Image (cartoon, rainbow, N blue to C red):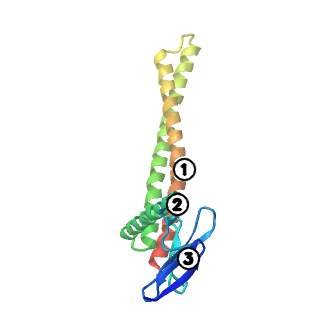
Amino acid sequence: MRRIFIAVALGVMVMPATGVAELYRYIDNRGVTVLDSRVPPEYISNGYEVLDAQGRVREVIPASPTQAELEAMRRARTEQERQRVADSTLLRLYSDVRDLDRAHARQVAQIDNQIVTAENELEVLQAQREDLQRRAADQERAGRPVEARILESLADLDKESDRLRRLIELKREEITDVDRGFAAQRERLSQLTH
């Protein structure tokens, strides 16, 4: 059988001319490009090239992804899946942008109603507070100490008023969040339906 000799960086290799001869080109830990009949296991994860008998690249085996790259791919797949589910839900809920705009208006109206209800309750509490203050002032003008029950009621009214004011502020912030969320959904729905 006829043999062809090919010089290799680390020595000489003998390959049959009639068979499919393969060489592997890889970079070792010193940064030297090596041609060999096999790739040592410690270099496989760095990637290598498969060469034919004429020295042409037949296949490129890429380096294995690093742990950070694997994690980035996993996050990207997770984000793509999350986006797919979100898009599917958006299309199931709204047939077009007008449907979404109506839902947005309904949600804002509900929050506005909660704000109006809280503001009305505040007005009622303010009227009760003024009545209790009048009674407390009457007792003081008459030279009597203010009844403990009136002072407790005033403190309770103040706590409830503070709670309602915080609620109103939170509901106003909620409207801002709802507007922002619906704006993003509107933009995405426009992309999906056009």
User: Residue 66, labelled with which disc?
Assistant: 2
Q: Is residue 26 above or below residue 175?
A: below
SS at mark 2?
loop
Whether label 3 touches label 1, CB < 8 Å: no
The amino acid marked with disc number 3 is Val
Q: Residue furthest front?
A: 1
In x, y percent, where is residue 59?
Answer: 49, 80
Report the Cα–Cα distance between label 3 and label 1: 77 Å
Q: Which residue is mark 3?
A: 12
First in sequence: mark 1 or mark 2? 2
Q: Which residue is mark 1?
A: 173
Task: Specify few, some or many for label 2: CA neighbours under 10 Å numbering under 14, 14-19, or 20 or more.
Answer: few
Q: Is residue 147 above or below residue 35?
A: above
Question: Depth check: 65 or 77 in front?
Answer: 65
Residue 142 visible in the snapshot: yes
Q: Quadrant of residue 140?
A: top right
In x, y percent, where is residue 163?
Answer: 50, 36
First in sequence: mark 3 or mark 1? 3
In x, y percent, where is residue 194?
Answer: 47, 80
Q: Name which residue lies at 58% across and 65% down.
A: 28
Q: Is residue 56 above or below residue 138?
A: below
